[in-house]
Amino acid sequence: MLQIDTWKRVLIWSVCVIGLFMALPNAFYTRVETSNDAKAAIELGVDTPENQAEAAEWPNWLPSSLVNLGLDLRGGAHLLAEVKVEDVYESRMEAMWPEIRDALRDERATVGTIRRQESPPDQIRLRISQPEGMPRALEVVRGLARQVQTLSGVGATDIEARAQGDTIIVQLSEAEKLATDDRTVRQSLEIVRRRIDEVGTREPTIQRQGADRILIQVPGIGSAGELKEIIGTTAQLTFNPVLGRGTDENASVGIGEKLAPSLDEPDVYYTLDSSPVVTGEELVDAQPAFDQNGRPAVSFRFNTSGARKFGDYTLENIGAPFAIVLDDEVISAPVIQSHIPGGSGIITGNFTVEESTNLAVLLRAGALPAELEFLEERTIGPELGQDSIDAGKVATIVAFVAVLAFMGLSYGLFGIFANIALIINVGLLFGLLSLIGATLTLPGIAGIVLTVGMAVDANVLIFERIREELKSAKGPARAIELGYEKALSAILDANVTTFITAVILFAMGSGPVRGFAITLGLGILTSVFTAIFVTRLMIVMWFERRRPKTIEV
Amino acid sequence: MRLKLVPQQTSFDFFSRWKIWLGISGLMMVIAFASFMLQGLNFGIDFRGGTTIRTESTQPIDVGAYREAIAPLELGDVSITEIFDPTFGPDEHVAMIRIQAQEGAEAVSADMITQVGEVLAAADAGLKLPFESVESVGPKVSGELIQTAVIAVVLAIGAVLVYIWLRFEWQFALGAVAALVHDVILTIGIFSELQIRFDLAIIAALLTIVGYSLNDTVVVFDRVRENLRKYKKKDLKEVLNISINETLSRTVMTSVTTLLALISLYVLGGDVIRGFVFAMIWGVIVGTYSSVFVASTILLWLGVKRDWSKPSNTAGNQFANIDA
């Protein structure tokens, strides 16, 4: 009648034991955490005696994965940034311009002279003086196009050129825009990661979200503002030829030129050639330094091609000023004194030591290809997080005790079986959460409490059913068996439907809500397991030993 | 001696006044809807954008002084509320400041937060800086969050409709979904009526209520399905009554254990999740009520195909018998 194969018993108990074993580190959270940090540090080569001692706090043979605490519990900063992917189109077109100009100049005989026209930032418009040469001009421009690899279109090229009267309009193709967007977001992600690593905080989460967004979560940082200073600066460094200097904010500039304000001198504006000589992309190193007057500065070094371009330019333009431009602001505009062949130099400005250090970090990590716009930011102070943990702990324990007492009072011995199963259930839940490295959030704690309340549901269904079957006087063993059998369909249907909502929450939700969905979903799995298998096994084992003639549920 | 909340044997007639129960539910839904239309929900920044700052001070909070201090910054609509909570210590005074989304900016600027910090520190010597928490959501994201939240709730209800339809009959599915819609509307209604802040976590609570209410309904329906086969001669009303009475003890037990857990969280869990827990407590009560008085009543009203001996090929019955 009430039989469970030995292998099943072994399996059930092993699952419980393994689950509880996996959950064990969470009971010693701080200790395991310091030990884990120390081990990670040793791995990175920081092998100090303190680290060794801290690492030894938690033995190696024990599992050491912990449930991650979400930002709302640990404190830290959360940012959702959107990458302004269109920014890149402009610089792409700007970089294209000299190439197009040179190619068309070679065809001067057929197309005549070319003049660049006013245009939206993602296009180049140019007028040719001999409209009859248009077919040849288009051919030449199209000849500059490169193939792009796309999933859909074979033979798509990166730029499109079309004629409008005597004007040629060149712009990026849709396929190239898509590919560029993707590349831009991936680059931004990488740069953000490098910058955060440079600052060295622990366990940051940096994820791509959707097509053009980046989610950044850094535990333990004081404020989202601090984080934004590090990752929000584009840090695009360029060296541009200076064409003029003035004080008029609205000074008219020619095509292919731009106006940039000075960083230090108020109301000073420089007119610059918008095609840079060299850009920060060609930097290989940047370090905080001091200039000959002992003021903070940043020294830099170009790679070979950058060094050559910089060398050639300085050689040809001795006596002319050039501007060092950071994010469209002129840091300084020195006059070239002599040929600078080595490809290294120094940026001076009115820096503080901190600013020069930050700038060096940003230049080293590389520039963001496009600007980031912050859509969402949250800072949670560590104290509030700790308060939430404490409150959550107390509430969970009280909830637990209340439910245990209530079950014991209502079902006696069977209630105690259910209670043991409930304790195992919560243990298994924590074990699973640590195993998959899930993040526990405040709503997640609510999910656990809810699981505690609802986990007994399956047992209640079974026990009530056993009570009913006992009424029809079938003998205890048969009643228990029928109770389990008949309650099963209700348990399954009820839990599947709740599980469906948990899955939908997980798929649609974000952050804390997702944390809730995870605990709720896993809680359903563990509670069904403990109700159907664990309590049943306990009841069967008790029944085999005692062989009671009557039972009271 | 066992604790028994419900006697062994009950034979309440749940449908003698079914028109009244449906009427009450209908009326409550109308009130909830009217409240929602008239005063709307007190949306948190998740859904309407803006910034909330949580401040803590060692001195009692003077909301008026805060308001005066912030006014010169011209930040538009600013609301300041003091928060009281039994878990706070004697010199722990917490206020929530909500600032509307600023023109032309998605997220808040660090400068603004610093400014607010400075003026408040001048007005309240006990203010702790940096702020306990600062959360800011831009209008772009908040719009999307509303959209996803609505989709999530609709999807959940749709998925459930399909599942119950596969496992039972379409009448059961309609009854269950009517109960769910009832619960969701009443929950939104009470949030609108009491003007409790409605944020992203409340959506999670709503979906949990959907899950819980369903759980309850499904247990009753499962018994109805079983009893329909057992008592072939009895009329539907009687079978429904028997089924609800038989499962009553379980319904009450489960509701009580869940409520025990939730109430302890409500009292002790801190103010941050209180709204969330409140929604769930309300949902458990309404959900329990609706599984009996809405779902079953609708089932009674729609009627059920009684002849289970001949499998019909309309309602996907191959799924109905996998474990019954």
Image (cartoon, coloured by chain):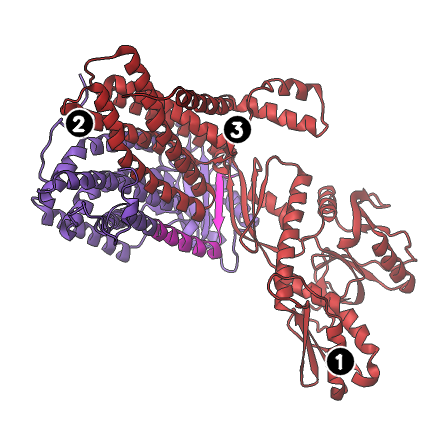
Front-lying residue, A55 or A366:
A55
Q: Earlier in the sequence, mark 3 or mark 2?
A: 3
In the picture of the structure, the residue carrying the numbered disc 2 is: A468
Give the CA separation, mark 1 to mark 3. Answer: 65 Å
Magenta stretch: give its range.
Answer: B131-156
Q: Residues within 10 Å of mark 2 (few under 14, many from 20)?
A: some
**Sequence-earlier tag: 1 or 3:** 3
Colour chain A appears in:
red
Q: Nearer the viewer, mark 1 or mark 2?
A: 2
- Name the foreground residue: A283 vs A461: A461
Q: Do callouts 1 and 2 mark residues in contact (Cβ within 8 Å)?
A: no
Figure disc tally: 3
Q: Is residue B136 magenta?
A: yes
Q: Residue at x 15, y 28 (%)?
A: B6
The amino acid on which the numbered mark 3 sits, given as a three-letter code, is Leu
Q: Quadrant of the N terminus of chain B?
A: top left
Question: What residue sits right under mark 1 in the picture?
Answer: A137
Give the structural element (helix, strand or loop) at label 1: helix
- Of the numbered discs in the image, which one, if any, rests on residue A66? 3
Where is residue A352 shown, x and y percent of the image?
Answer: 73, 44
Query: Can you tell which chain is drawn purple?
Result: B
- Write down the chain letter for disc 1: A
Q: Mark 1: give few (<14), some (14-19) or many (20+) Cα within 10 Å.
A: many
